[in-house]
Amino acid sequence: MSIGERLLEARRAHELTHERLAETSGVSSPYLSKIERDRALPSRTALEAIVQHFPDDERKGLLAERDKADLERQGFEPEIVELVYAVQQLDPEDRRAVVARVLEHLAA
């Protein structure tokens, strides 16, 4: 599911109108419409503003999906994108442990 589809689904699940979400997030209604229709990839800052009042799991999921889309647009191999995405889903302590282990392995 794309960022736009996930955002639209979350907005509807929280019974927010398009106009209300645009107003509370500080983005224009046309820009929000483009995001929901996958015609624009929002900046991380814009997406953070849009999802600021969503529950933590939805907010984190949408931000991680945005970061994943950004890596794909930059041309990273799918395996690298999936690895980064998976690591982002970890809590900070586990994330540090995984990164330390990978770096240790690469140094060996």
Image (spheres, helix red, strand yellow):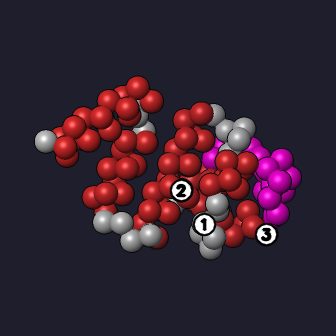
**For discs 1 and 3, the disc positioned in front in the rendered view:** 1
Label 1 sits on what residue type?
Leu
Boundaries of the magenta span: 10-30
Local SS, label 3? helix
- Whether residue 97 sits left or right of residue 29 in the image: it is left
Disc 3 marks a residue whose amino acid type is Pro
How far is the residue under mark 3 from the one under mark 2?
19 Å
Q: Residues within 10 Å of mark 1 (few under 14, many from 20)?
A: some
Q: Is residue 14 above or below residue 50?
A: above
Q: Bin the neighbour count of mark 2 within 10 Å (Cα to Cα): few under 14, some 14-19, many 20 and up.
A: many
Residue 14 visible in the displayed image: no
> Nearer the N terminus, badge 1 or badge 3?
3
In the rendered structure, which disc, 3 or 2, sits on the residue that comes first in sequence? Answer: 3
Give residue 54's position: percent from left, percent from top. 67, 38
The main secondary structure of the magenta stretch is helix
Q: Is residue 21 on the magenta stretch? A: yes
Mark 2 falls on what kind of element?
helix
- The picture quadrant where one finds residue 27 is bottom right
- SS for dot 1: loop
Residue at image position (55%, 41%) is: 60
Q: Is residue 63 left or right of residue 77?
A: right
Q: Which residue is mark 3?
A: 30
Q: Position of residue 91 (x, y in %)?
A: 44, 29
Q: Is residue 63 above or below residue 56?
A: below
Residue 87 in sight here? yes
Q: Residue at x 30, y 34 (%)?
A: 100
Q: Which residue carries the number 1 mark? A: 41
Q: Are marks 1 and 2 in contact (CB under 8 Å)?
A: yes
Q: Position of residue 25 (x, y in %)?
A: 79, 50
Q: Residue at x 43, y 42 (%)?
A: 88
- Residue type, mark 2 in image: Arg
